[in-house]
Amino acid sequence: MNAVAFIDRAALPLLVQPIKRDLQISDTLMSLLIGAAFIITYAVGGWFVGMLVDRFPRRRVLAMGMTVWGISTMLCGSVTTYAGLFLGRCGVGAGEATCGPSSMSLVRDAFHPRFRGRAVAIWAMGASIGGGLALLGGGAILHFVGESGSYVLPLLGITVRSWQLVLIMCGAIALPVALLVYTFKEPARRSVGTGQPIALRDAFEAVRDRWLVFVPLFLANAATIMLSVAYSSWIPAFLGRVWKLPAGEIGLTYGLIVLFLSTASQFIAGFLVDAVYRRFGLPAIPALGVGISALIFLPAVLVPVAGSIVAVWMLLAVFNLLAASLFTIGTSTIVHLSPGAAIGKITAVHFAWVGITGTAIAPTLVAVVAAQFFQGTLGSALAIVGGALAAIGGLCLLVVYWQLRPGDPVSSLACETA
């Protein structure tokens, strides 16, 4: 499910150049398609989805969402105007709002706390698998059809541009998978108290009781997601402009990096999260994130300013190997801290928050910094933004670790939610 969601989500950055050329739009308008159009409905829909997840069968919520985002992605490939593409991206955001809260609620109920890190990691691997497949498949289509080429759809006889074909095929994948979701077994809910879902106000009170850890945790997760999204959104365009690589080659090479290294990162992170949790307790999970944030600082700064394409690919590989693990670490901490009866609402707020900051702000932030301070040079903007976000994420995770130390009142409250 998560892989399918990220196939739809990750295809667009690869198509920046052909879409800009056909629609005659700027980097800033393109960044709004990648970010703001998606997150408007993703964030607003998340509030509603959180209440559905805590009250209704989660597989139905997921299947409905997958159908919506699949059809919307296909519609994105059927339009020829900026307004139509913007509205289609809004539909994708509304559908994908169901994925995170539903999945995290299922993970919390289906797995013992000692195994939740691996469960979250396997779910999170879908982002890398989907993103990698979108880049590989999209790159192959662009290589076959040509970045500026057209293709006649079989049976329908309709001529579409290469970027439209990529979006139509990405969206079509979601529809049969939505049917498979109905075959999943729904685990019994590990609710607390009366066994009934709690009100949205009570969910906010649960967060307020632990605000000293939730606030820096939400900030840390936002910074690390912004870091990943900033890179994934603009690296294809950066490689095309600075190193003059064709989109097909970028998609194939970058897709392999994302597919294998980012996936491996999340898989390894899941085992590390469970291992440090068993050995040292909950505070060790954000501590692990602090170390990885420190390690990722150098590649985040050096990728855009490296002196050769070989160095760029090597540093980009290291970056993806580290960056993907931060999402698993942050989300695992949220799952451990959230009460069972409120996890749908809390994770909905969390995914809306990181969606707004990551998906909406990060792409536009890079574009604005490049335009305002570096005469449109993406490399310098990526280096500045990437380094700053890595540092902010690490510092916020350090605060989370400090608040969760043994004997701290917040740490005691966290134990009650397991």
Image (cartoon, grey):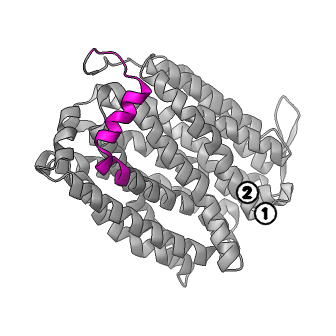
Q: What residue is rendered at 58% in x and 29% in y?
A: 66
Quadrant hosting residue 229: bottom right
Label 1 crowding class (10 Å Cα cut-off): few <14, some 14-19, many 20+? few
Is residue 105 in sight in this rendering? no
Left or right of 57 in this view: 147: right
Q: Which residue is mark 1?
A: 26
> At label 2, which amino acid type do we have?
Met
Quadrant hosting residue 325: bottom left
Is residue 27 in sight in this rendering? yes
Look at the picture and state if 206 lies above or below 306. above
Which quadrant does the C terminus fall into? top left
Task: Evaluate if marks 1 and 2 touch, with contact meaning CB atoms under 8 Å apart.
Answer: yes
State the image coordinates of residue 322 (x, y, percent, origin top left). 38, 62
Question: Which of these two is toward me, 59 or 204?
Answer: 204
Question: Which of these two is toward me, 294 or 310?
Answer: 294
Q: Which mark is residue 30?
A: 2
- Chief secondary structure of the magenta portion: helix
State the image coordinates of residue 175 (x, y, percent, origin top left). 62, 26
Cα distance between the residues tagged 1 and 2 = 6 Å
Q: What residue is rendered at 22% in x and 40% in y?
A: 414
Q: Which mark is residue 414?
A: none
Which region is colored magenta?
Answer: 194-217
Look at the picture and state if 203 lies above or below 180. below
Magenta includes 307? no
Q: What residue is rendered at 55% in x and 43% in y?
A: 6
State the image coordinates of residue 7 (x, y, percent, origin top left). 58, 43
Disc 1 secondary structure class: loop
> At label 1, which amino acid type do we have?
Ser
Label 2 crowding class (10 Å Cα cut-off): few <14, some 14-19, many 20+? many
Magenta includes 207? yes
